[in-house]
Image (cartoon, coloured by chain):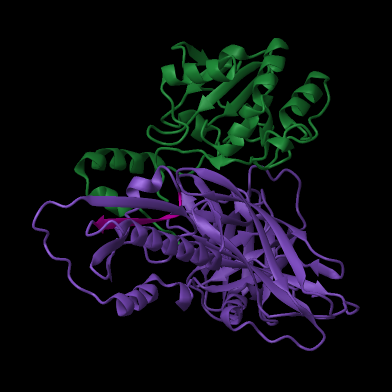
Chain colours: A green, B purple
Amino acid sequence: MKRSTFFPMLLYPTLLYPMLVALVLCSAPPLASAAKVGAAAPDFTGTASTGKTFRLSDYRGKYVVLEWHNNGCPFVRKQYNSGNMQQLQKHWTSQGVVWFTILSSAPGKQGYATAPEENDYLAKMQAAPTAALLDPAGEIGHLYDAKTSPQMVVINPQGVVIYDGAIDDKPTTDLNDVPGATNYVSLALQQAMAGKQVETPATRPYGCSVKYADATH
Amino acid sequence: MKIPATHRLSNWLLLSELIGGCRKPRKPSRPRKNRVFEFCLEGTRLQSRRKSSKIRLCWFRRSVLVRRCRRDHIRKTLRDALCIEIKMRWHSPSSTFYGGLACGAALLLSAASAQAEGTPIPHGTLELIARDESIAAGHTLDLGLRFQLEKGWHIYWVNPGDSGEPPRVQWQLPAGLTAGAMEWPTPRRLESASIVDYGYEDTVLLIVPLHAAASLAALQPVRLGAQVRLLVCSHEMCIPGKAELSLILPIKSQAPAPDTLTAELFAATRKSLPRPAAGNWRFSVADANDSFVLTAEVGHQITQAVFFPLAESQIENAAPQKLLAEKADFRLTLRKSDRLLKPIKRLKGVLVLSGDQAFLIDVPISKTGTARNNSGDGAH
């Protein structure tokens, strides 16, 4: 049974226009081509927290990792508080991989951050992505059909998605589960760089749902 | 959840009124000091706490006001707390003593009622209960994890859907007792933008059968322990939680008597569990290119059908399930998940018809999609 908290919002006129816009935007059916493993990665342009613009197709010829992020989600915190995500970012960017942290939370929702807030967070956490792309409208998120945070997408130098799914195989919020977990991102990159077939190209991403703009539940 | 009669504040107040006599406090001729004691006690929440109610307790000439605080101003400091504000009017120096007495009594009451409720989890409570009052050797006893969640918060089904995690239990059981597979009630579709999860809101009882070996001797009562890790989410955020639960039950050789408090709850939950489909119903699943088409011959027209897959990453949870209903059968189109890379042989899950009839089905997937006899008996 679908429950809707939509109706009370209509009582507030100031929220009507955004609601109508959101209705129109979300009436489109989900994209069938979203981030299918083996298919071409959809191109996008994103603005980083530093103000610089990044375009995916500019990085053809390099491996690209997309990391969906929400700093309030306990699953994301597990990766950051243990230092695991930062260590992955540092290691792979030093190997020439381009790492984009993407924030697709809508304004006012958990995980949303303004540019200065995100820069503070990156500094505090000592995170080392190539850039943190701010996507409050959820465009990049919807383009890749990102469902959870963290969710990881790995794109090869030919622009094809070679991995889409969870960061590792321990879907818990316990920090103790980080050391022993099999990291699917590292595995995919290692295997692809060695010229081998990626063994686990897709897994169910675990985490909190991405807080897109038009939530009805 | 009912508070035991001995713990209700109203009963205690009635008693004290009888002892002390109740007089309306007179308006003081000169300004008196009003001392306000406010105690916030951590405990599990009581059921009716929407309004703050004033209860006047009269004790001789002193009046002590006991009032349930509104949650707002204590929410930041303590979750699930019962706040008792005690206002004292000075009539004599010994009013402090009575104030202390009232506070102490309130403290005891709160602690006692807290035990009756269950272990607190984020935005709810969790209890380990049993259907019977004892364990019988060689028989199976139904244990249950009873979740009571605040409005707007939910936990997840065995297949949580696009996000979230189901509750996981680790049992600490003595020798001779083994826990069977959890029996999950029919989940609900929890939709949020392009993300669909499967879970439960409000209250739910997850049944776990406990098998007792026939060789189990009727020794001392045994302690059944469960460590539950869970995720409680609203549509805004998720909070992980952990609960240590325990239940002490005696082992008896004769047939156990059902626990009057819980037996009804277990019976109602068992009735609502998804059940195997009728023997004469026929199911088949055809593997179309980007979707599975479930065809069911059920003998009457269906107006609503929803399928909940037991395994993750098989169907696209957010995609609408198109229903084509005929007089005696129907077809349900289920879009395949983008993550389904290897072909699967069977489709297992819960099929909910007309909103409330839930059936467990286990159907082989065929290319041609011809209906097979007894392929939908859903034996598990």
Q: Nearer the viewer, residue B253 or A171?
A: B253
Residue A118: % across, % down: 47, 20
Q: Quadrant of the C terminus of chain B?
A: bottom right
**Residue A45 seen in render:** no
Where is A207 relative to B148, above or below? above
Q: Residue at x 69, y 87 (%)?
A: B257
Where is A198 relative to B282, above or below? above
What secondary structure do most residues of the magenta stretch adopt? strand
Q: Nearer the viewer, residue A134 or B201?
A: B201
Question: Which residue is at the far left?
Answer: B29
Where is B333 relative to B289, above or below? below
Question: Which residue is at the far bottom?
Answer: B254
Residue B311: % across, % down: 69, 55
Magenta part of the chain: B79-89
Horizontal relation, residue B225 to residue A149: left or right: right
Q: Residue at x 71, y 28 (%)?
A: A185
- Magenta-colored stretch includes residue A122: no
Where is A143 relative to A91, above or below? below
Q: Give residue A87's quadrant in the image.
A: top right
